[in-house]
Image (spheres, rainbow, N blue to C red):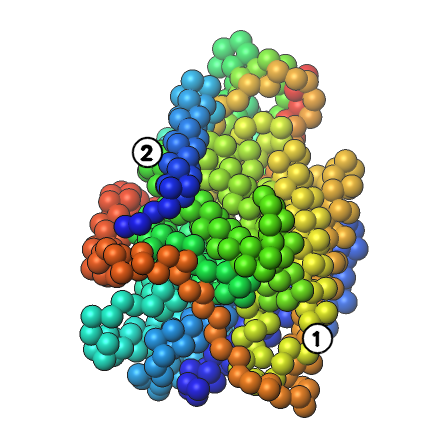
Amino acid sequence: MYKTANRLTLWNLALGMVALFIGGSMGPLQKLEHVGINLYSSLREIGIASYYQGLTIHGVLNALVWTTFFICGFLTYATVNSLKRELSMPRLNIAAFIVMVVGLVTAAVPLLGNLATVLYTFYPPMRASGFFYVGLTLFVVGSWMVGWGLLFTYRDWRRENKGEKTPFVALASLITMVMWQFATLGVAAEILFILIPFAFGLTDAVDPQVARTFFWFFGHPLVYFWLLPAYLSWYAMLPKQANGKMFSESMARLVFWLFLILSIPVGIHHQYTDPGVPTGWKAMHATLTLLLFVPSMITAFSVVASLEIGGRNNGGTGLLGWIRKLPWKDPSYAAQNLAMILFVFGGIGGLTNASYNLNVTVHNTMWVPGHFHLTVGSAVTLSFMGISYWLFPALVGKPLWSKTLGLWQSWTWFIGMILMSNGLHILGLNFGVPRRSSLGVAEYLQSDWQPLMIEAMIGGIILGVSGLLYYINIIGTAAQKKKLEEPIVMPVAEPYHPEEIAVQPAWLDRWRPWIVTMIALIVISYGPVLFDLISRYNPVAGFKVW
Amino acid sequence: MHIDQTERRYIIFALLLVGAFGIAIAISSSAYSINVVRPESQIDPKLLTTPGATAYDGFAEPPENRLRELSPGRYEAYIIGYATKGWIWEPEELRVPAGSEVTFYVTSADVTHGFIIQNTNVNMMVLPGQVSKLTTTFDTPGTYNFICHEYCGILHHNMYGQLIVE
Ligand code: HEM
Ligand SMILES: [Cu+2]
């Protein structure tokens, strides 16, 4: 229907999938290394020199590239189909995609050449090739442009539909994109003012504490950039797929606005153990983080209530009987519901991490990858896979190749992730095993870690198999001759209480108050501490240590 | 705005829950002093071992003198992390009697490191230019590994030291 938007969505999805394939295939290798099976020596020939280069590829491609491409594609599709209007500046969105690709290639060359083995957080004073930072910048700028294209489209829609309420799906997509524009200012400042001059030799020293603070200004909202598109699907699309309704449309809108204002002023909760940040700021960000937990709690309630409506519509009865009547045979549904279940544990673990001094029991231990494979690695990635089970067929005009394979994929991801994440969590919490370490050859390796490492390794292998099943299905879908009998339309659930929509307060569809609040919160929570850190700017020399 | 009755109750519950968590955190950090690092004076990583050049003369002692007994049972230890000297902590080994209270001052001579002592609440980032300080008490005899937990280069996984409680 909307040709440019569709084609762009398809391209974004395809590149995201390629990134996840390459990045994801490092995962099982890492797990095998931990139990002493080192396959990296055989990877030298294809240019991967070390565990750490592999880990950098894993982090950059999975956490930054796969997610961003998928989100840019999905939100483009969602906005256009929700507003029922083609992009107003198709060339801007096409240019955006090209800029992202150019950025990716520019960063990939040093990454693959072992000139940027700095992990996806690239903390200075480690100094990577300047092109790595330039590439990342272009990639982010491209993603901004995607957002601008969507916002122009929205502006035109508003002109054409005076007085109409923004549909929820479009609103949620745009809020996510606007949040991203502000969030990335942190990393843009870090890269443009600190890292690029440093990498190209214009300055020979940087302050790592200042750089980290800019990084985490971006680093926390980054996780909401990943999560909000999944929430969008859980709120508005999944209930439709389950034959349910949106339990509380107003609440869903409020939740997205709350994420807009609260995602950024919490970044210092990643820096509780940083020496240079005053404890008062740590405590303040801890408090805001606890508040940020509330919209996620509301989401859990609303989404489950919406699905329950579906289960009951399908004939489910009793306190829990409706659960069996959910469309578990539909891989798109099953993947996302399983992702939600894993996210419950991810959320609880996240609350632990966020709890200020409790953080010292887990910071930078294996607990942390245990945690974020439940969140970005499952709640987000498995949900995106689930979304792609309807979206990819919609885009290529062919049915999903195999539902059975899709179900196997969803369940193997679920089981593999439970095993891997359980092992990693306990290793970190009980034994203080460090993350980001080539453990298989570490001198401090202890024999009592082994059972858990083996458990996690088995989980990692199952995940690897699950990943393969996914790609087989996607390739099978694209390669087959069969065509869709009728086009797939974007699933959007109706509100359960249509009467509530009429009396929805106007501030739920107004941008200015929320943007002003967001900026105010950022200024209050970051202004003084950044000023303090910058006024104590203490530059140190750079190193290449890999 | 219309909010369902059950949902309203649930939201109130969620708010009370995070409130309770906040209070628990406040109590544990004030009453039990389980704490996170706080800023110390900044330091020039090039001058760490030059006597008199920084506010922390402990770093300028030879490695074997970096553990000091302040009073019976109270110690301070000055530890420098190096990627550029082959991924080590200096000193690599410390010995204290059981029941000792040790204050750790840790810094880096080059890139970012991390410092965790297994089975304790000591966990902090170690940045060049900053000093990370935490205190803990060792009641149980044994060997405690202190491990670098931030990626610091190709042999990062070899970077650890041992504190032996006798
Ligand atoms: C194929 C399944 C996967 C396996 C077996 C796997 C395994 C691992 C392991 C063992 C680590 C820890 C390495 C270390 O700290 O030394 C890790 C790190 C990481 N993984 Fe995965 N992973 C998988 C998929 C994913 C996915 C889908 C994502 C995100 C979309 C992801 C994102 C990350 C990130 C961001 C890190 C941190 C890298 C760093 O510390 O710099 N992983 N993975
Ligand atoms: Cu280190």
Give the residue number, with chain letter if any, for mark 1. A402
Look at the numbered disc 2 and give the secondary structure of its residue: helix
- Residue type of the residue flagged with mark 1: Ser
| Whether residue B119 is situated above or below residue A456 in the rendered picture | above
Residue A138, percent across and down?
40, 73
Residue A285, percent across and down?
36, 40
Residue situated in front as seen by the camera: A487 or A207: A487
Look at the numbered disc 1 and give the secondary structure of its residue: loop
Residue A71, percent across and down?
46, 68
Can the viewer see residue A540?
A: no
Asked if the residue at label 2 sits under 8 Å from ligand 2, the reply is no
Can the viewer see residue A466?
A: yes
Q: Residue at x 27, y 57 (%)?
A: A504
Q: Is residue A503 left or right of residue B119?
A: left
Q: Chain of mark 2?
A: A
Q: Residue at x 44, y 76 (%)?
A: A77
Q: Chain of mark 1?
A: A
Q: Quadrant of the N terminus of chain A?
A: bottom left
Classify 10 Å Cα crowding around label 2: few (below 14), some (14-19), many (20 and above): few
Q: Are marks 1 and 2 on the same chain?
A: yes
- Asked if the residue at tag 2 contacts the one at tag 1, i.e. Cβ–Cβ closer than 8 Å, the answer is no
Give the residue number, with chain letter if any, for mark 2. A280
Tag 2 or tag 1, which sits nearer the N-term?
Answer: 2
| Whether residue A458 is situated above or below residue A106 in the rendered picture | above
Q: Quadrant of the C terminus of chain A?
A: bottom right
Residue situated in front as seen by the camera: A6 or A141: A6
Q: Residue at x 57, y 15 (%)?
A: B100
Q: Residue at x 37, y 46 (%)?
A: B4
Mark-to-mark CA distance, 1 and 2: 54 Å
